[in-house]
Amino acid sequence: MSENPTKLDMDTLSAYAGEMNMNLEAFRTCVESRKYTKAIEDDVAVAKSIGVSGTPAFVIGRSTPEGVDGQLLLGALPYKIFEQRLNSLLQ
């Protein structure tokens, strides 16, 4: 799927679902019902509000009642960066 990020028509999505041995009838019903549209749009809005513009994106920090208080890391970064950020939380 990551090779064709613009191919999001039902036939293509169903083919991917079939490759993963998903129940195709349940998959189609779920997608066509748009049951999760609002939740997805809300998540996208939150991501945009903190500066996330793509994937991968990580927030390294501490959990708070409001979410996570931490630093945003964008992109596929080397392990060393994650190690440094995580270790800084322990100090």
Image (tube, rainbow, N blue to C red):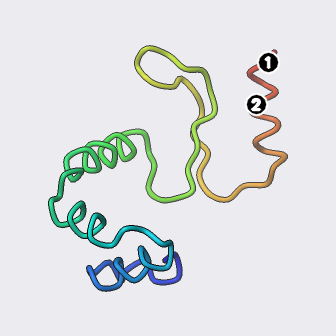
State if disc 2 and disc 1 touch (CB < 8 Å).
yes
Q: Quadrant of residue 86?
A: top right
Residue positioned 55% across, 20% down in the render: 63
Q: Position of residue 67 (x, y in %)?
A: 45, 24
In this view, 36 is above or below 4? above
Residue positioned 17% across, 66% down in the render: 32
Residue positioned 24% across, 50% down in the render: 36
In this view, 11 is above or below 63? below
Residue topped by disc 2: 86
Q: Nearer the viewer, residue 34 or 91?
A: 34
Query: At numbered mark 2, what does the secondary structure look like: helix, strand or loop?
Result: helix
Q: Is residue 11 left or right of residue 88?
A: left
**Residue 90's disc number:** 1
Decide: few, some or many residues near mark 2? Use Cα within 10 Å; few <14, some 14-19, many ≥20.
few
Q: Position of residue 2 (x, y in %)?
A: 52, 75
Residue positioned 52% across, 58% down in the render: 55
Q: Position of residue 47 (x, y in %)?
A: 39, 44
Query: At numbered mark 1, what does the secondary structure look like: helix, strand or loop?
Result: helix
Residue type at numbered disc 1: Leu
